[in-house]
């Protein structure tokens, strides 16, 4: 094999496997040798889904890097996947295409999620290509796994001859039709579907795929962000922002497209609604596994992928109740109907509620907001506040009855009774200050709250002083808190200056943990654990968790917390974990023992994999060894 002398001309939408096949047709070597001449020694046995060692091709042909870029853009599946792959995977993809390295299984698996397992042709395209270019070639857009028909002609895509059922292309890609006939000489006749509605849908999908493959389309982060923004803008995200109504979104999308259309693209509504699918739906790392679903979602949101990409929609909810100031609704207040309330306490439940406290009269009221429609005139009064109470007391001491007091206060008898009931029987001229906890007012009533706050503070203070006296001068803050943590915490929240004045000073934080020393200590413990596990191996595969279980809980916790900073320990554990092949060798005697106790006469491969599931995962070499060893134990 020599240098690459010439590269075959490429055709519109040609699959890269077809280009490799046509290169082989002009080469004197075998197909494998032709591939190695192009891409180096590390070539897959099956068809080339993406190019490799492009650096060598560029060098030997004497072309610029633009040649390689066009080859990737126009003839591989990289452009279709590009916007759904992470930065790290894109980097691996680029390195695999430009360098001579082993095939990356991760990249192959990523491509195979979107590409049909067998190469397919459109009979109509075969005839058009043959008339135009005098050759039949494999089209890239025909190979997407979600398509069953040609998007241009509506013809059903075929992978075998309609007459003799012979495959049109083999698994390695060394045999492909170059004329519209199969290898047995049967003509492949065109048949197009000219249904206008279907053709319109196909054309729209083709435009969306073409847009998605454009190099200017955004990255995975951009697409994921746009999907989330559109979901929120269309009302599919809870107003708290912590929940996406995935099932409702998918249901609406199914209704929009219809089940038959989705089925034609390989999407089952029942499958989409499964719990596992719903969990992964709209997760950034899962977009690449079902690209057609998200392509349809883009069209559902914006009409087309192009409109979706161009949209600059932002998603934000208005601040519930606005930014203030808010009105006082107490007709007795001198600031009635004026924006004097500067703060609001918002709480999010099934909807958002706001608690408003007037600083002048003490009235507390609540409003309900998003997602319900906001209305400043709709509110619920939690407590009328000290201004109302003191006026009620004033009129009561003057001898007015409850009905007359209610008339003076623009209220009703029940409300007046509620607030005066605790006062009846008390000394005259008892008024109350504004310095009362609003929450206590709501929970206890205004008058009880005043007394409760004062008495509770004294009780809590006395408890802390008692704790300091009982525990002695050397007691720490945690010791004092343990004496009565409820009263300690209450004072810390409501009377902190007094508490700080009486508590001992805070202890200094301990010195920084010596991670290097910790690594050495845990290494010693884990060395003992490794010896114990190796001496008494478990029936299951030996993993890091087996070694950690032999240590105490403190060692386990410290390892999981600081493992990034424990190189010695990590190296020790990683060296001693058991590979799948080692595990398969170790448990072979156990499998034989189970077989000898069973009713079976021969330890076949199927039985071997039944007794030891590891033989479904181990390497081919170990599996062959196990099968040959098993033959010795036939009964």
Image (spheres, rainbow, N blue to C red):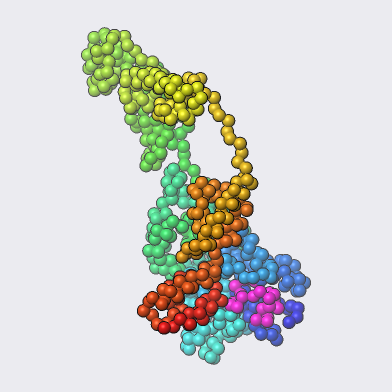
Determine whether 531 is above or below 138 in the image: above
The residue lying at 46 percent from left, 57 percent from top is 281
Q: Is residue 34 magenta?
A: yes
**Observer-nearest of 476 and 174:** 476
Q: Residue furthest bottom?
A: 185
Quarter of the image that includes the C terminus: bottom left
Kindly tell me whether residue 623 is visible in this rendering: yes
Instruction: Pinpoint residue 576: horizontal percent, then vertical percent.
Output: 57, 61
Which residue is depicted at the point 54% across and 64% down? 578
| Residue 331 in view in this figure | no
Q: Residue 154, position in %: x, y?
A: 48, 74
| Magenta stretch: dominant secondary structure | loop
Residue lying at 54% horizontally and 78% vertically, measured from the top left: 625
Q: Is residue 67 above or below residue 132?
A: above
Q: From this view, report whether residue 274 is shown above or below residue 474.
A: below
499 in the magenta segment: no
Q: Is residue 385 left or right of residue 48?
A: left
Left or right: residue 436 versus residue 309 is left
Quadrant in which residue 445 is drawn: top left
Q: Which residues are magenta?
A: 32-51
Residue 46 position in % (x across, y down):
58, 77
User: Residue placed at 34% from the left, 18% from the top?
Assistant: 451
The total number of labels drawn is 0
* Quadrant in which the N terminus is drawn: bottom right
45 or 121: which is nearer to us?
45
Q: Taking 515 as reference, is 475 left or right?
A: left
Q: Nearer the viewer, residue 567 or 74?
A: 567
Residue 433 x %, y %: 38, 15
């Amino acid at each position: 094999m020599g240098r690459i002398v010439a590269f075959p001309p490429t055709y519109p939408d040609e699959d890269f496997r077809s280009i490799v096949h046509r290169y082989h047709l002009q080469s004197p070597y075998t197909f494998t040798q032709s591939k190695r001449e192009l891409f180096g020694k590390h070539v897959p046995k099956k068809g080339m889904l993406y190019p490799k060692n492009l650096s060598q091709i560029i060098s030997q042909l004497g072309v610029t890097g633009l040649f390689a870029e066009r080859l990737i853009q126009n003839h591989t599946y990289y452009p279709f996947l590009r916007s759904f792959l992470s930065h790290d995977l894109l980097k691996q993809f680029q390195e695999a295409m430009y360098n001579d390295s082993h095939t990356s299984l991760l990249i192959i698996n990523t491509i195979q999620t979107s590409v049909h397992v067998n190469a397919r042709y459109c009979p109509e395209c075969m005839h058009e290509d043959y008339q135009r270019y005098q050759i039949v070639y494999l089209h890239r857009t025909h190979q997407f796994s979600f398509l069953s028909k040609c998007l241009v002609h509506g013809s059903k895509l075929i992978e075998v001859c309609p007459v003799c059922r012979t495959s049109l292309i083999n698994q390695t890609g060394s045999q492909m039709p170059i004329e519209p006939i199969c290898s047995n000489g049967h003509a492949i006749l065109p048949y197009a579907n000219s249904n206008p509605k279907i053709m319109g849908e196909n054309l729209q999908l083709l435009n969306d795929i073409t847009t998605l493959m454009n190099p200017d389309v955004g990255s995975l982060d951009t697409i994921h962000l746009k999907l989330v923004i559109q979901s929120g803008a269309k009302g599919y995200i809870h107003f708290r922002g912590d929940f996406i109504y995935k099932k409702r979104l998918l249901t609406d999308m199914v209704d929009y497209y219809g089940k038959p259309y989705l089925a034609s693209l390989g999407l089952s509504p029942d499958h989409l609604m499964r719990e596992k699918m719903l969990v992964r739906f709209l997760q950034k790392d899962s977009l690449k596994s079902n690209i057609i679903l998200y392509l349809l979602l883009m069209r559902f949101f914006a009409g087309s992928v192009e409109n979706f990409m161009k949209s600059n929609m932002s998603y934000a909810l208005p601040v519930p109740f606005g930014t203030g100031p808010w009105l006082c609704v107490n007709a007795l207040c001198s600031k009635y109907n004026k924006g004097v309330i500067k703060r609001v306490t918002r709480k999010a439940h099934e909807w958002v509620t706001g608690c408003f406290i007037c600083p002048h009269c003490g009235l507390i009221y609540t409003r309900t907001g998003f997602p319900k429609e906001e209305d400043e005139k709709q509110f619920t009064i939690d407590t009328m506040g000290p201004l109302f109470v003191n006026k009620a007391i004033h009129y009561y001491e003057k001898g007015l009855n409850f009905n007359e007091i209610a008339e003076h206060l623009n209220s009703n008898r029940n409300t007046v009774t509620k607030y005066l009931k605790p006062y009846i029987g008390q000394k005259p001229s008892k008024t109350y200050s504004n310095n009362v906890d609003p929450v206590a007012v709501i929970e206890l009533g205004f008058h009880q709250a005043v007394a409760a706050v004062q008495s509770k503070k004294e009780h809590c203070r006395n408890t802390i002083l008692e704790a300091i006296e009982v525990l002695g001068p050397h007691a720490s803050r945690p010791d004092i808190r343990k004496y009565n943590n409820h009263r300690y915490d209450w004072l810390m929240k409501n009377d902190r200056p007094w508490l700080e004045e009486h508590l001992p000073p805070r202890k200094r934080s301990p010195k920084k943990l010596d991670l290097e020393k910790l690594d050495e200590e845990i290494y010693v413990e884990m060395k003992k654990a490794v010896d114990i596990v190796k001496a008494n191996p478990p029936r299951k595969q030996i993993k890091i968790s087996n070694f950690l279980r032999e240590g105490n809980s403190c060692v386990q916790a410290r390892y999981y917390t600081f493992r990034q900073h424990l190189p010695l320990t990590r190296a020790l554990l990683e060296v001693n974990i058991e590979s799948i092949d080692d595990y398969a060798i170790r448990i072979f005697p156990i499998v034989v023992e189970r077989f000898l106790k069973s009713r079976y006469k021969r330890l076949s491969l199927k039985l071997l994999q039944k007794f030891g599931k590891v033989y479904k995962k181990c390497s081919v070499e170990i599996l062959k060894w196990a099968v040959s060893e098993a033959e010795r134990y036939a009964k």
